[in-house]
Image (cartoon, rainbow, N blue to C red):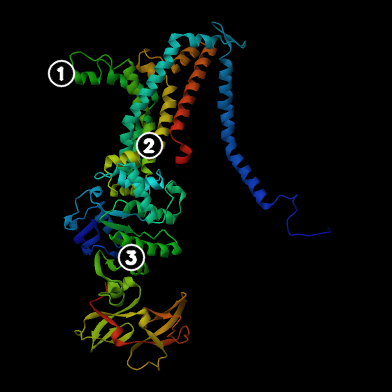
Amino acid sequence: MLNLSGVTRRYGETVALEDLNLIVPDDTYMSLLGASGAGKTTLLRLIAGFEEPNAGQISLNGERLDGKAPHRRDIGFVFQNFALFPHLTVQENVEFGLKYRETGACADPKELTERAADALQLVGLDGFGHRGVGEISGGQKQRVALARTLVTEPRIVLLDEPLGALDANLRNRMCDELRAIRERLRVSFLHVTGSETEALTMGDTVAVLSDGRIVQADGSTELFTRPHNPAAARHLNAWNLLEGTAWAGALDTSAGMLPLSRPLAEGAAAQIALRFDQLGVSDLDAVPGGRSHFTARYVTGEFNGPTALSFFRAPDGALIQVVDHLGDPRLPELTEGRSYALHYAPGDALLFEGAST
Amino acid sequence: MTTVTTDMPDTTETSPAAAREANERRRALMLLSPGLLWMILFMVLPMLMVIYVSFWTQTTFAVNDTLTTASWERFLSSATYLGAIGTTLRIWAIVLVATLVVGYPVALFIGLFVKNQTVQTALLVACVIPFWTSFLIRVIAWRPMLGTEGAINTILMNLGLINEPLTFLLFSEFSVLVGMTQIYCVFMVGPITFMISRIDESTIEAARDLGASFGTIFRRIVLPLSMPGVIVGAIFVSVMVLGEFATAASLSGRKVNLLGNIIVSQVGSLKWAFAAVAGVVLTIIITAVITLALRVVDLRKEM
């Protein structure tokens, strides 16, 4: 179990991570979701030991890691740009850690070859050992980087946007393979990504990093359906957030007065979150009974294949998105520039107290 | 078969692709020609001329173009001249090793430990500051440093470490080695720094993450990746040291005779054929050294 408590990292005046707490359990695939510049890479570099935190503790299975040299931490790091050794062959790259580690180096050439071959087989690169790293494709480089890390049997594997440099097709295949490989090795993976789909697909658990803190860490379904705060909801790219102030038992938002699911003090700031796929659209005078609604003007639509995204503007200009599934359409025929009623089941709306930041 | 018309262009006309290729070849030739012309006029032709002159007949005060191998026989049978070859090779080898030993750590520091590019450049510029003054000044400046009443001897005597001045410091092979190492070190530092600073920081971090200590990383990653820089630096230093004469002339008190010194003195006494022989021998040695260096690392692959 990897345990980070109160970890803070500053660069001069800039705070990259502040009082961050995170637990990565054993034998888990955890993805770490954050916007670019949120400090995801910094977090991994702190765990691997390339940088030290200004405050806080990092421990692995009860043993303190911070302050230890990176080559004594026994943690695997898969770099975003692969960082293969350009002057060595694929085989030599994979053998590097086994052969040259400070403690427990393997000197037996037969064992080295065998273990490297096993690792290459694990990532599906049988027979590529003799190639130079300049002679293989991006996806293959990614696999070599993974094999090179896995062969040393690290206690936890950190993957820094491992699929970022791959094309979409390859990305989907690597997703499945990464999960399969991890399940075979029974070691924890901490996978950093900026893409919410990748995070939700890959992770048994997804942690959302925002403004230098972990704002929520939960199972993917739990996180997607019940984000605990506006920051988590925003990172999922599936929730409309409407902010406003409580007034006369409702929330006065940019889209109008919306009912509150629980009473708030008069004048308190709050946000209502409405999921893209839980909003229905109807003509202004045909709102189905039992559903709350507000008015917005239809701007344009975007066709994404199996789903279609429709964009609306609330009276004050806030952008509202609605997702429709092609196989099971809910939306009527929409005309650009016309106003519609956007309705939802009151129970689907989430209420977050406090002003947006 | 009767008239079959196709859309294929007439074969007698050049296709657009061929025209473009011809165009590009012409441009390449245009870019190449000034350099090529310069090299032919001022390097290839004089080289051939030197080889030719080395077979001329040398009398005391004149040369004539009757071909003979007399100069070659005299050169190759003279202990003095063969000794000069030996001295040249010995000094070259020692200076090469010394510049590497002094220069590599400096390059390692600038290339690997200085992260800021501006500071990197500033440090490299600092390395060439001695070149802002003339070669002769740089060489002669060693005299007040190394002389019997020079700075080093004075300091050592004042410290009570020695009773009488060390005489081997100046006008000896030692002073030539010190002078040459100082002057040519920067040519070693530059190329090595360049190669080291090109090493991707993350490959070093990756090696560290895989459990390698700094020493291992240096041996297995940094050193092999900087080898092209070492070779380029070695070629620079070799070419300059092998053709050297001024440092030896002013710091050795004429005790050290390099091939370069022989050429200078022979030209001075108008022994053209003989100077040409020494010149050809020197060129052969330099060519051999460069060939050897290029054998060690395939620069085309690395650069």
Looking at the picture, do discs 3 and 1 lie on one chain? no
Q: Nearer the viewer, mark 3 or mark 1?
A: 3
Q: Nearer the viewer, residue A236 or A272?
A: A236
Among the 4 quarters of the image, the one containing residue A225: bottom left
Mark 3: amino acid: Ala
Q: Along the horizontal axis of the image, is A208 left or right of B96?
A: left
**Mark 2 Cα within 10 Å, few/some/many (few <14, many 20+)?**
many
**Residue topped by disc 3:** A35
As helix, strand or loop, the secondary structure at mark 2 comes to helix
Residue that protrudes farthest toward the right in the picture: B2
Location of residue A81 in the rendering, given as x and y in whole percent from the top left corner: 38, 54
**Residue topped by disc 2:** B192
Looking at the rendered structure, the number of numbered marks drawn on it comes to 3
CA distance for labels 3 and 2: 39 Å
As helix, strand or loop, the secondary structure at mark 3 comes to loop
CA distance for labels 3 and 1: 68 Å
Does residue B137 show up? Answer: no
- Residue at 22%, 86% in the rendered image: A262
Query: Label 1 near label 3: C-beta < 8 Å?
Result: no
Does B265 appear above or below A351? above
Mark 1: amino acid: Gly
Among the 4 quarters of the image, the one containing residue A242: bottom left
Does A286 appear above or below A92? below
Q: Nearer the viewer, residue A245 or A27?
A: A27
What subunit carries mark 1? B
- Residue at 56%, 15% in the rendered image: B54
Quadrant in which the C terminus of chain B appears:
top left
Q: Along the horizontal axis of the image, is A327 left or right of B68?
A: left
